[in-house]
Image (cartoon, rainbow, N blue to C red):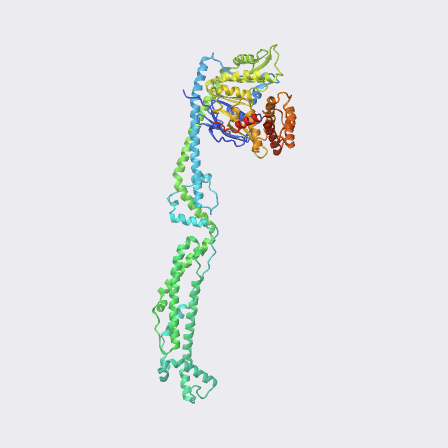
Amino acid sequence: MPESTILEKLAYITGVGIWHGHKPESPDADFASKTIVYGFNGTGKTSLSRVFSSLEANAPVDGLGKGASFQVKFSDGTTATEADFMHPLGNHLLVFNSDFISRNFRWDEGSALPIFHIDEENIEKVNELRQLEADLETASPEARAAKTRQDTAEREYKDKGTEIGGRVREARGTGYTQQFNRGNVDREYSEKEFTEQDNLAEDRIDECRAIIRQSEPLPKINLALELPESFQNELQTACELVRRDFSAQLSSDLTAHPNMLAWVAEGHQYHKENQLGSCLHCGNQISDQRRKTLAALFSESWQEQTNAVTVAIEWCGRSRSLLRGWLEGFPSLSAIQPTLAKGFSEVEKAFRAELISTGTAIKQLQEALAERQRNPMESQAVPDNVTKLLEADWLNGFNDSKNRLLTVISEHNSINDQFRQRKDDAANALKGHVLFAEQNSYRQLKRKAEEAEKVAQKAQSTAKDLKEKAETLRNAIRKHGIAANELNKLLHEYLGHNSIRLEAKDEGYQLVRADGSIAQNLSEGEKTALTFCFFLTQFGAEGRDKKKLVVVIDDPVSSLDSNAQTYAFGLIKKHTKRVAQVILLTHNLKLMHMAKRAFFRGVNFGDTIPQGLLFVDCRDDGKGSRKSALVKMPSHLAKYDSEYQYLFSVVFGASDQQSTDYLYLLPNAIRKLLEIFTAFAAPDKSSFAEALFDDSGKINGLDQAEMNQLERVCQIESHGDIEAVNSLPALTVEESHRAANGAMKYIRERDRKHYDAMLRIVKKPVAD
């Protein structure tokens, strides 16, 4: 027979009383089939019990808090949270706490709510109910398992969406800040079918990433690369001047000395302008005939030709300067949009070569013209690469090369104009690439989650129907009068008299005294006895199987004397002996030790602290508030029947290490520690305060400030009850540490042997 399901772990709790973000760090704080949770009043035990009450009610109970958040794990692997109270225990979880009492009893009316038992006489309906419960026992785990599968499938589907969203963001890089999360992924797949066209090649991926990485567009580039309209006509004229024959106009003597032509022309012009009759060079008279000959030779036609050569040479210079300016004005590669860099480099190289080639040809033409200017008699040959410039193919090739360059520049400028759109387009392209790659796996996981949801809903609906049918049938055959007899028997044993009993009335119980009057104004002890017996009676109610019960009991011995406490625990021990699990929460040290010995019989607490022996550790959070956590019980509490060793460790920690962890506890801890110590160290004193102050003058090293704080602790700040830590005391941190220092000095100087023994205890490593 499989073990019954029990509560395994309080995995998380926050926003419940003073529980703020508690998450056990190790399995030491797991629950066991027998569990004791010890903690002082005000440390959050009732708040903890309300988490279990909410599970019992399948809804948040009053006092849990609107901001409550928790997760409870069960031994079958299932979990319950504040958002989903479904759990495997069904009606086999019972919680006793102050809320249980206020929910079930009306003390001013002397009444209680009913406890229903099944009428075994109606055997046919009982059998039907048993079958429904058996079916429900099968259906409930199936529903939980289906819900677990649904949660797993939905988590995998959502995790995949989160993963894809992360991949899209990663593909885009940090240069594109628009968010893309799981919701975006689901919407994209709902609206579009991604195809092979969305699958990008590696070079396209790199290009898109380069676009996105660019934070700002590069400046626009303006290039003027138009040749003058007269370029080829001027070129043609210059070529003709190189080829033209000037010798027909020259005299024989100048033909013989062509290098002197320019000198003679300049001299003739000078003599003419200055009306000189004789040659300045040779001194001979210049005859009229000679003048006429030279005038004819250097006629206006000749001058026009020589001027034309000069103009052509200047044109070559200007053309070369123009081409050189273009070369120098080309943008650097870093000024070009990165995605165009490769193409720009190619066309720029080609056009640069074209310009250099053209410039070289014009330079050669210019040199030929210069030579013709120096020696007009000798015609020159036009270089072949100059002649090519006159051909239509050259002009077409030149313009084509130039236009390819300008096309890239135009694209660059267009990118500047459409910078944001290009980034968006690149981002969308990368997004589509990722979504195409993940499309099949995502949709498969989504279908799986949807199918799991349908199965879970069907299984939950089946379990809900069975539960409702069972409840309907149970209501038809249950009786609450049966429980009164059992409850009165327990109450008589508990109180030792029959002066108070319960009588079935209508849909509940009436509390009556022996004379038949309504029982009101009960003592706190009577109320505690009555409510706890009322709780125990429910173990067998509602068709519950005690072997499957999980019972949570919060401080059941409030207002009971020592004998009543012992008897109360006897009832707990008897009635929980065979339940699947009992969790006892208490601030009563005596009850804790009784339960410890009964629940963990045979355990040597000096050697080990068993699982299930827990402590509510309430500490100062450093911000003026308390914060509780569920931890393995400190060895100083588990090992000894008195809290003295634990109190000594708390006060010693505050004194020796200046600890602020237990500021709430410290005043009461100091007082209780000194009460216990002086009861044995100074038995002749009427109170520990008297012993403390009588001895203070004899204590070496105890200064007045420490003495003042001890006095304040004794008379004002504490109430002699270590069980209560409800608010931060008025002591400052410094004052608390002074009081702790004083207490340690007092114990050390009063009884050094005792002090040294205590040090060996508190400094000894805690047993595992």
Q: Is residue 253 above or below residue 141?
A: below
Residue 716 relative to residue 225: left or right: right
Q: Nearer the viewer, residue 111 or 280?
A: 280
Residue 571 relative to residue 251: left or right: right
Q: Nearer the viewer, residue 361 or 476?
A: 361
* x then y, percent, for residue 486: 52, 13
* x then y, percent, for residue 162: 45, 38
Tell me if residue 633 can be seen: no
* x then y, percent, for residue 471: 48, 19
- Identified at 46% across, 15% down, the residue is 126
Q: Nearer the viewer, residue 697 or 573?
A: 697
- Identified at 40% across, 57% down, the residue is 345
Quadrant of the image containing the N terminus? top left
How many marks do you count on the picture?
A: 0
Q: Nearer the viewer, residue 75 or 588?
A: 588
Q: Is residue 531 above or below residue 695?
A: above
Q: Residue furthest top?
A: 515
* x then y, percent, for residue 612: 48, 24
- Identified at 42% across, 27% down, the residue is 145
Tell me if residue 761 can be seen: yes
